[in-house]
Structures are given as structure tokens and as C-alpha cells.
Amino acid sequence: MFIDHDSADPVIPDEVDLVVEVAEMMSVFAAQRLVRVDRMRRQALADAAVRGRVLTEVVERGVRLELAAALRITEHAAGDLLGFAEAMVHDYPAVLASLERARMTERHAQILVAAVNELEPELRGQVLGPGLALAEAEPVGTFRRKLRSLIDTVRSATLTERYAHAVTKRRIAVEPDQDGMGWLHLYAPMVAIHAVHSRATAMATTVTAADENDTRTLDQARADVLLDLLIEGTVAAHPEQARGIRATVFVTVPVLALLHDTDTERAAAGIDPAVVEGVGPIPLPLAKELTGGAAGWTRVLTHPETGMVLSVGRDQYRPPAALQKLVKWRADRCMAPGCGIPATRCDIDHHIDWAHGGRTALTNLGPLCQGHHTVKHHTDWTIERVPGTGGAIRWTSPTGREYLVQPERAVPVFRSMDSNGAPF
């Protein structure tokens, strides 16, 4: 039973409380298991040394076999568990302590350790602290995405050189599958792949909408469109309105970044890298090319004095195109707790419904994927904007629990002032 010390009445836990309690116990037990797995490994190595066995690799193979047999898992899984336990106990004790206190789940810890281990040693300290804070605050999906963004930003000083090397490895490969099917893998710059997917989605949507008898799913139509384009080039069989479709991708460039010649100089000046929606940081030379007028790109130069369309009030329900783009750019993702669906694939939701007097304004709009849009309108979940936060919204569950969702990018809060300088 939970006791509220500010009240004489006991607080009876509901079903969600009970689930959360068990989940927290699982985190504590997971931490204990890691400590004991590492102790088992070290004890086995110490015993082997006493007996004069110096073949550490062979001893560890024996430990892996015994752990796999005891836990009824594969030796590969046992090896992963041993490596994870060693890293947590000896390299990342702060992460282990957080897991022991149930401030994160074991999955958060696995993602964090794996990501930090991949970094150059001199960069790990810049990621571990902020990454730990994210792990303790965010759902797994959001945490994974924000951690990747953090790592990309930390490594962005060398992005140009690494990108130049990586792009030389671009290639395609064919992988056969069953039933006469197969996979065509394309390894290429993520910016280009993102644009290809965007164009294929737009064309597939247009093609299927033009024929009411077309029963293909979006995935099926998207695959067919790509095959048509690769085999036929410009496809006469496509409706006219689908032939001119090109990719639309958002690239966000801090305007002061354009004053520097290299990513190294930009990073030294403390300026964030250019970012492509759904992709992450891109090299500064590529950013300059795109902001210079490349077709098919929506360019957003971030600056505190940038003018923007903020509201059309009650004059129209549907936001104008510029406002839709700004709403989606600000959020980057669906604004439901933990959802990772890109904003470009979401509906624009009026937080206060239009039918209930809601305004078509930046302060009342946010992207929701189709599933969460349905949840918002047809269940007892509610959402409300948090004034003064630049776009955060608070979700309240049917059990009364609250979840704060922050947009990916902050937009300055603008207030109207009267002639005397007072807000109104």
C-alpha cells in the first residue's frame, strides 16, 4: 500500500501502479544479475589462474558455455550478456547505479552502452552524461532517437571527412529470398535515400488515389513505383499528376554555420550542424549546396528574428501551407508520448478542437500520426498545450497520469504588445 504523507488517507495503487512496480523490480533485478554475471566471470578467471591455466580465451569460452547451459540460452546470447555485464560493472558504473535504482530500464542501459562503446574514446565523456540523463527521462524509442542525434552532433566536427570516405562505398546488392522474391539493397547517402523514399511515397499515394479499384497497400504501391522507375524510367502508365512528383525534404541550417568553411571550424565556434529531417547531421559543404537553391528542398534558416506565419485564427480551419510546414518542422515527430513517426507522415491536429473554438494557430497545432490522432479523439486521453514552452503538450491518460512531450525544435514565443508595451 502506498502512503501519501501529506494526507491521512492511504493511497490505493491502481493496476498501472502495480505494473510499474513490477517493471521497477525487474530493473533492480537486472542490475543484480549483471553484477553476479561479472562476478562469476572474474571468479572463473581467478580460479583458472590459481591452477596455472593461462589461456584466458579458452577459460572464458568455458564460462560462456556454463552460463548458456544454466540460463538455457544460446552461447552467443551468453557472450553478449557477459560483455554487457563487464562493461556495466567496470566501464559504466553510473549507468549500473541508475539501473539499480530503477531510474531506467535494462533496454535503455543496453542501448546507451552499445552506442557509447561505438564512439571514439575521446568522445565518450561528451555523450555518457547527457545520454544517461536522456535514458532516465525518455521512453525507449525517443531515447534512442535523441541519443543518436546527440552522438551525431558530438561527432559532427569530423563529419565532412567521414562522409567523404563513406560515400566512396556506395553500392547496390541483390539478396535472394523465398517464393521467387528477393531484396535490392542500396547503400548510399542517407539524404538521397530519404528523398527517394519521400518521392516514392508521394507517387504511390497519387497513383492509388487515381484508381478507385486499386487495392494495393502503400508498401506494395511504393515498391511497384520504384520498380517502374528503375526499369522504365519515366513511366507513361502513371497518371499525369504522378509523373512530376519530386522529393520534398526539410534541411535546417543554423545561419551562422554558413559563415564557416569547415565542420571543424563550425564545431569549434559552438554552432550546431545542419540537419536533415529524419536523417540527422549532414556535412557543411552539402548544407551550403542545399541552402543555395537546390530544387526539391524546403530550407529553414534558424534565426531568432526570422519571420513566420503564426496564426490564421478562426478565419479558416485548414492551416496554410507555410504554417503546416512550420508545425511539422518544429515537432519533427508525432507529438504522442514516445512515438517516432516522422511529422511529414502525420496529420495536423488542433489541440483544442476547431468545433470547440480552437484556433488555427501555431500555439494550437501539432502533428499526430493517424493512430494517435484517433486515440486523442475517440478515447478518454486528453491533451493540452503548455504555455510559454514553445510547443510542448501535456497528455493526460484515462487514469490521470500526465506525460509531457517536447517538440524537437524550439520556436520563440511571440507576444502581442499594445502601444504602451504591455502584453495583451
Image (spheres, rainbow, N blue to C red):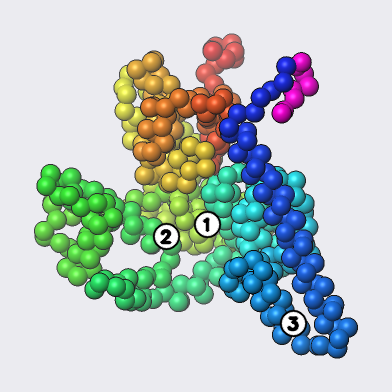
Q: Which residue is mark 3?
A: 59
Nearest-to-viewer mark from 3 and 1: 3
Q: Is residue 217 magenta?
A: no
Majority secondary structure in the magenta region: loop
Looking at the image, residue 247 sits to the left or right of residue 340; the answer is left
Residue 216, image x and y in percent?
A: 20, 52
Residue 4 magenta = yes
Secondary structure at numbered mark 3: helix
Q: Which badge, 2 or 1, comes first in the chain's sequence?
A: 2
Q: Amino acid at mark 2?
A: Val
- The answer to which of 236 and 117 lies nearer the viewer is 117
Between the residue at mark 2 and the residue at mark 1, the CA separation in whole angstroms equals: 10 Å
Residue drawn where x is 64% and y is 71% of the image:
68
Q: Earlier in the sequence, mark 2 or mark 3?
A: 3
Q: Is residue 26 among the parts visible in the rendering?
A: yes
Q: Amino acid at mark 1?
A: Pro
Q: Quadrant of residue 71?
A: bottom right
Q: Residues within 10 Å of mark 3 (few under 14, many from 20)?
A: some
Mark nearer the viewer, 2 or 3: 3
Q: Which mark is residue 281?
A: 1
Q: Is residue 300 visible?
A: no
- Residue type at tag 3: Val
Q: Which residue lies under the disc numbered 2?
A: 191
What span is in magenta? 1-8
Pick the residue in front: 147 or 338.
338
> Quick one: quadrant of the N terminus?
top right
